[in-house]
Image (cartoon, coloured by chain):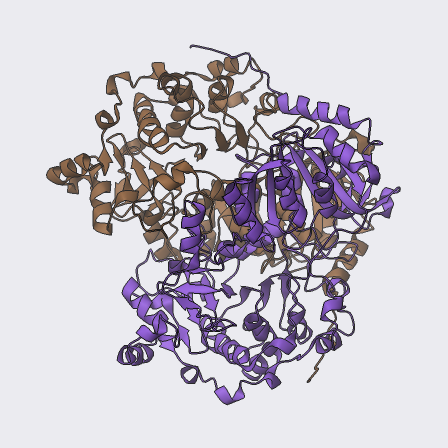
Chain colours: A purple, B brown
Amino acid sequence: MTHTSTGRQWNTRRQAKARRKQNAAAVADGKVVPTSDIVAFLEAVLACGDRVVLEGNNQKQADFLSRALAQVDPARVNALHMIIPSVSRVEHLDLFERGIARKLDFSYAGAQSIRISQFLEDGQLEVGAIHTYIELYSRLYVDLVPNVVLIAGYKADRQGNLYTGPSTEDTPALVEAAAFRDGLVIAQVNEIVDDPAGLPRVDVPGSWIDYVVQADQPFFCEPLFTRDPRLIKPVHVLMAMMAIRGIYERHQVQSLNHGIGFNTAAIELILPTYGESLGLKGRICKYWTLNPHPTLIPAIETGWVESVHSFGSELGMEAYVAARPDVFFTGSDGSMRSNRAFCQLAGQYAVDLFIGSTLQIDGDGHSSTVTRGRLSGFGGAPNMGHQPGGRRHPTPAWLDLIETDDPLARGRKLVVQMVETFQAGGKPTFVESMDAVEVARESGMPLAPVMIYGDDVTHVLTEEGIAYLYKAQSLEERRRMIAAVAGVTPIGLKHDPATTRRMRSDGLIALPEDLGVQRSQATRSLLAAKSMADLVDWSGGLYEPPARFRSW
Amino acid sequence: MTHTSTGRQWNTRRQAKARRKQNAAAVADGKVVPTSDIVAFLEAVLACGDRVVLEGNNQKQADFLSRALAQVDPARVNALHMIIPSVSRVEHLDLFERGIARKLDFSYAGAQSIRISQFLEDGQLEVGAIHTYIELYSRLYVDLVPNVVLIAGYKADRQGNLYTGPSTEDTPALVEAAAFRDGLVIAQVNEIVDDPAGLPRVDVPGSWIDYVVQADQPFFCEPLFTRDPRLIKPVHVLMAMMAIRGIYERHQVQSLNHGIGFNTAAIELILPTYGESLGLKGRICKYWTLNPHPTLIPAIETGWVESVHSFGSELGMEAYVAARPDVFFTGSDGSMRSNRAFCQLAGQYAVDLFIGSTLQIDGDGHSSTVTRGRLSGFGGAPNMGHQPGGRRHPTPAWLDLIETDDPLARGRKLVVQMVETFQAGGKPTFVESMDAVEVARESGMPLAPVMIYGDDVTHVLTEEGIAYLYKAQSLEERRRMIAAVAGVTPIGLKHDPATTRRMRSDGLIALPEDLGVQRSQATRSLLAAKSMADLVDWSGGLYEPPARFRSW
């Protein structure tokens, strides 16, 4: 044998971590960093070129740490490679403007999407890649192992034991990648308790956390999943009725994920009325993977919902969730435990259906929420909205989509696009070419940022009707089916009335009347709650809407 | 509004858990259950019909708890619904024979696969579904929420803080589903320490664990991923050379997962020799998701491997892994942390390539390891071996498989089937119809247990050559390409020499000589280690092979 050992040193990461801790010793008191010393502390532990994970989630933001990081001296700390699941804060991009950071890997950028595009154009920022949440976590264990991870929680003790409260979200997935690869983990918390017994529970063990710092104010959290029932229109109710009859009842959908639009909120709110009248309680919509949507309260109270597992929390729902432990995942302290990694996993592999909205759909059924000048990223939708080819267990809904008698046929996840044919402002939803294609060209992206690909979509539901795309025998047929429900958009105008009639009688598309849905019944009176006040009432006063929603 | 509150009670699970704990109080001392009282304890806390997760992983087994469970009085505890990731122990099926359990949801059954088939036929057992590992975990958060979870770790303190050591494996995913839904978690450990400081580290916080019990003997663990280099044949070396030149080098494969066969072990062992001679070090095979395969040691020692994230541990590799923290994921105590859920996630979403072996491939490229009379399940392969449609970030290898200039084209994960055309015993690998189809029919399964579907496979590699299936423009062409490398099997005999010549010149298939692979070079002398003793030598004596491999 030709044994050619390289004499390589095998603990360079561990040594680097020890050095960081040595530098930190002048600032920190054990694991506790004084609030006012956080900038000096970050300058002491960070090295130029570090790969740094910053917890910016869909909702929860480690904003004290991100503000502090934006204040470090770029002469001392620069060229950082930032990994931020959701780029949502002004200071996230200040890091690049000030030269502290250079490269960005991310999943989603809401409010900052325009600025990312500009910075990219100006050469102030280099994008590694745009991911879904779950593939970004995955890379932390493969080729994007972090040097430093900055996260947020509610409380910690002086040993670093962390209570994340209902907002566990991405934290465990981010922390583990550093805690077990000699990375440094720094947690901002709203409160540090002296006595470990003062923690309601432990969400992350103290030995995984290197430093804790009390933030100058509680971490920022946004109520992204709250929809005011006042804004639900009759057309949403009509579409919700069609979803229940033409999809949920027809395919026996028992486990599901809902997007955050008014369409799906309408479904949630007519389960206790319309769904009840159809005798569907206990037969559909029992198991949910979604955040604690306030509009789900009436369905929960009337006994529709067996369980809800959540990606994250929702502001105002804390007391309600804690009072419904048979439905929600809660800890021994009573408060919710969310977990985005596991919920994305469950939403991919364990539910019958994903239903969501989008901004643009092309004639082939591809869809995207990307519009010109915005690099908004993917978030979680592509993970929920595709056919998980690694799935092997059957459910009635999954099997119901098999259209052949081939013994090797697989079932399908139901992936439903539920859209009005026109967006607010009169822009057509169905378009010849998505803006995403142009954005990709302009930004030099290797791929167009498609949220959900046409071949993954099984149903398109509009106010016109439902297209059962999984029945399409060819791409041509899929196109005809989409055109048939696309109204008077450029795509819809292509439809041929004779073909549409034939497809209707063949069951490839269905209009409301084919589903036994009476248009005259589609009014707001079907909504179990018509306002935020109604939701509070349903909850027995447990739901406390954030101030901006308290307009009744 | 029509508020119709049901007056439902919302904490029935929490009350049930409190009752279980009340019943347990007569047996347990705080959280500690005396070893000798475990059967009485299980009878006290379990209720008939409970959904019980039993940690039987690929390697690690909560065997003390499974043996105890098989001894409870079926008159007191019966009709359990068992959820067992890997059914590997005799007592797992004794539970059904004795009437203690009734229904089984599982992922994989190795040694017990024949008995499951028999029990199913005899009506002694009802199968819920057969899953991949990751979808079974997913369902614990949706429609298979457990009442009780039985797991295994190395050490615990009296507060339940758990040290799993290198074998963290499935434990966190199983525990979380119960700990945060008012389920009961019971951990067997090899040792209970009085002082929490006596734990090397905390892998699962004490507040998630309700009871700990010291097992009568250390938990059972099997070295499933150890391959003795002595058994690697020249044909494996030839195929390994083809894989490196025709796949890894060609597509720039940087991150990957290897199966456990001798084929892939051969690849690992010729990286430091053949791979080195091609100048490929640092260009391919840098990031790995796999268990600590002993045959990877020479590649690690010669600097090929940047990182390894693991599903589970491998017996004998503990000291070696602990001495290579720059490569492996280890905790602050120095020992490895594995995590099957995260590694499956990484293997699905973050790597360029999966390469594995199988027992049967049909003419369309579908494959299965299921053979008659055995209900062996899926394990993890279908998760690694499919196109993850939810992936959005590009890598060079992923992009390299795009065959069109459609701006909406997606890249592809490389899914490689690496098989000899005949199995040991002269059975053809390439068959007209897989046994899986017949097994499904006989067992009344709704789907044939296909491990990897033909449309997910991008390359088939045999001793004859490589078929680049991702280039196939039609199912017919895919079939012709498979036949061309299927040797003298029933499928291979169908190939038409003229077509094969044309496909070869079109680059659809490649023979060794097309890849610059010299058959004469394909000898065992290319193996960096030729025996277990060589591996120990490469490891500087750190690798300690289990007894059954110590035959040199």
Q: Nearer the viewer, residue A328 or A447?
A: A447
Taking the view exactly as shown, the residue that stands out farthest to the left is B498
Q: How many marks?
A: 0
Taking the view exactly as shown, the residue that stands out farthest to the front is A122
Q: Is residue A204 above or below residue B440?
A: above
Does A278 sit left or right of A57 as displayed? left
Q: Residue A407: horizontal and vertical position, in percent?
A: 32, 58
Q: Is residue A164 above or below residue A413?
A: above
Residue B49 shows up from this direction: no
Q: Residue B428: horizontal and vertical position, in percent?
A: 26, 38
Does A481 sit left or right of B505 as displayed? right
Q: Residue A145: horizontal and vertical position, in percent?
A: 58, 34
Q: Nearer the viewer, residue A443 or A360?
A: A443
Classify the position of the N terminus of chain A by image quarter. top left
Does A41 sit left or right of A272 as displayed? right
Residue A143 shows up from this direction: yes
Q: Residue A530: horizontal and vertical position, in percent?
A: 66, 80
Query: For residue B260, which quarter of the picture?
Result: top left
Q: Is residue B36 above or below residue B293?
A: below
Residue shown at the point (33%, 49%) measured from the top left: B455
Q: Nearer the viewer, residue A156 or B225?
A: A156
Taking the view exactly as shown, the residue that stands out farthest to the right is A194
